[in-house]
Image (cartoon, rainbow, N blue to C red):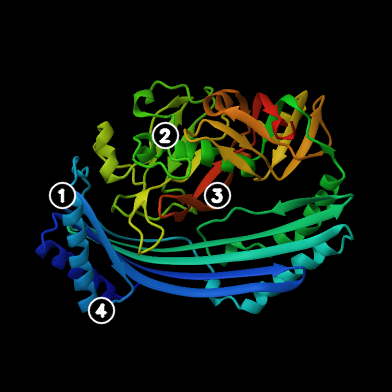
Amino acid sequence: MLESSAIDLAHHALNVAQHCGAKYADVRVTRYLRQNIMCEDERVSGITDSEDIGFGVRVLVNGAWGFAGSNGLVNEEVERVARQAVEIAMASASPLRDPVRLVHEAARQSEFRSSCNINPFTVPVEQKVSLLLEVDRRMLKFVEIKKAESRMSLRRDERIFASSEGSLLQSDLFVTSAVCRATAVGDGDAQSRTYEPPPLSMGYENIDAASLLANADRIAEQAIAKLRSQQSPIGLKDLILDPHNLALTIHESVGHATELDRALGMEESLAGRSFATPDKLNSLRYGSPLINFVADNTLQHGLATWGSDDDGVEGQRWHIVADGVFRGYSTSREVAGEIGLERSTGGCRADHWSSIPIVRIPNLSLAPGRQPLSLEELIADTDDGIYIEGMGSFSIDQMRCNFQFGGDAFWEIKGGRIVGMLKNVTYQSITPKFWNSCDAICDARFWVPNGVLNCGKGDPMQINRMTHGASPARFRNVAVGAARV
């Protein structure tokens, strides 16, 4: 955890802000450690190590927000920044029509630490590089593989949150991930295959060297098979989507669509509106009765499991969609009251001490099926379809409704059997139509907590992370191949 002097500075900032006229104030002091290692074709293409520490002061004056931050952790700079935040709020209040009103949140004092058996920053760089180079070497032993890439990302975020309401919250979060990719080239074409185990809020124990090495051969072989495979068919197909592919589809068509600031029209950058407006709450048939989207910011190892958000709201678990019906949003204390909620769901997070917190997607997962069902059984029950693994390209309209997704690997299903690989498959649909076409979800044995590390939102853009778990699921009569027309 950060030193106790950081807590003293936070309280000093609160005192100055209140003395200058802030009705409400909070302070975040945050330190970030980052290490990224990138290898390409059995050579190290980049190693970056960084440490960044600073603080942000957010205030409410006359119903308007003011925010300022600095990396100068001394009393004089804290005082200057607190006064600046108040001055910005005062200037913002003059043209304001609708003052900000925060829903109630009880003051709390707590500490939260993510799981970490092995501190990733104490593992020698040579050990990490050696692993990635060996992964590259295994992929490149296949003559058709012309490009091998591997990388590792290690993060630690230490945070103190203090508010004028009396909250003092501390967190210490680790995030670790690794990925490798093989690209096969031949006959005027290039096709890639990726292995990306779930990024998790854990220590270096999440970097499974045996798994990375064991999968290097497989993805190289599948990249070659993909290169030689048939093009995507065009028409309606039953789709079986693996958890990694579903993670991105959930993220774009459900996660962003149910951020309340978007639904209220308060956020419009980066395809920023939503069809899932408050008048549809508790009535919209978002998906089939099998569909349950559960938001859970208490999920063990979840990327958005921070203990509390940057409004000081404790992590919670709730339904976004229950039995197919639209039931809830991710909210902040500012927007929750706009639809009559008495408490925020705790979805307000900033990506940096210099960023003002905004509404973000929670850990949002598709609940597994309730009946025993394996992927093999699901394939055997599918007569004419495509099984899709991994994330690929995507696009979605301004209202988060009309979309197109790709994938990383594709297998054609005929008569309940996989008969070969395909390439360049995309699927297109409308969000409620797509989720209503789901007629089968594998059970909890096959649920995987994949996630997104680079979710962009806002202007200026903020990058944040969240987990999207799922089991393999089937969707009937989905349009594929339109990108080829």
* Quadrant that contains the C terminus: top right
Q: Along the polypeptide, which appears first: circle 2 or circle 1?
A: 1
Q: Along the polypeptide, which appears first: circle 1 or circle 3?
A: 1
Q: Is residue 124 visible?
A: yes
Q: Along the polypeptide, which appears first: circle 2 or circle 4?
A: 4
For marks 1 and 4, give the CA distance. 31 Å
Mark in the foreground, 1 or 4: 1
Residue depicted at 37% across the width and 56% down the height: 350
SS at circle 4: loop
Residue behind mark 1? 94
Q: Which image quarter: residue 220? A: bottom right
SS at circle 2: strand
Q: Residues within 10 Å of mark 4 (few under 14, many from 20)?
A: few
For marks 4 and 3, give the CA distance. 37 Å
Residue 133, x across and y down, in percent: 74, 71
Q: Which amino acid type is marked by label 1?
A: Ser
Q: Is residue 249 left or right of residue 183?
A: left
For marks 1 and 3, give the CA distance. 42 Å
Q: Which amino acid type is marked by label 4?
A: Val
Q: Which amino acid type is marked by label 2?
A: His
Q: Along the polypeptide, which appears first: circle 4 or circle 3?
A: 4
Residue 58, x across and y down, in percent: 25, 58
| Disc sitting over residue 407 in the figure | none
Q: Is residue 243 visible?
A: no
Q: Which amino acid type is marked by label 3?
A: Gly
Residue behind mark 4? 74
Q: Along the polypeptide, which appears first: circle 1 or circle 4?
A: 4
Residue behind mark 3? 451
Which sits in the foreground, 122 or 261?
A: 261
Residue behind mark 2? 319
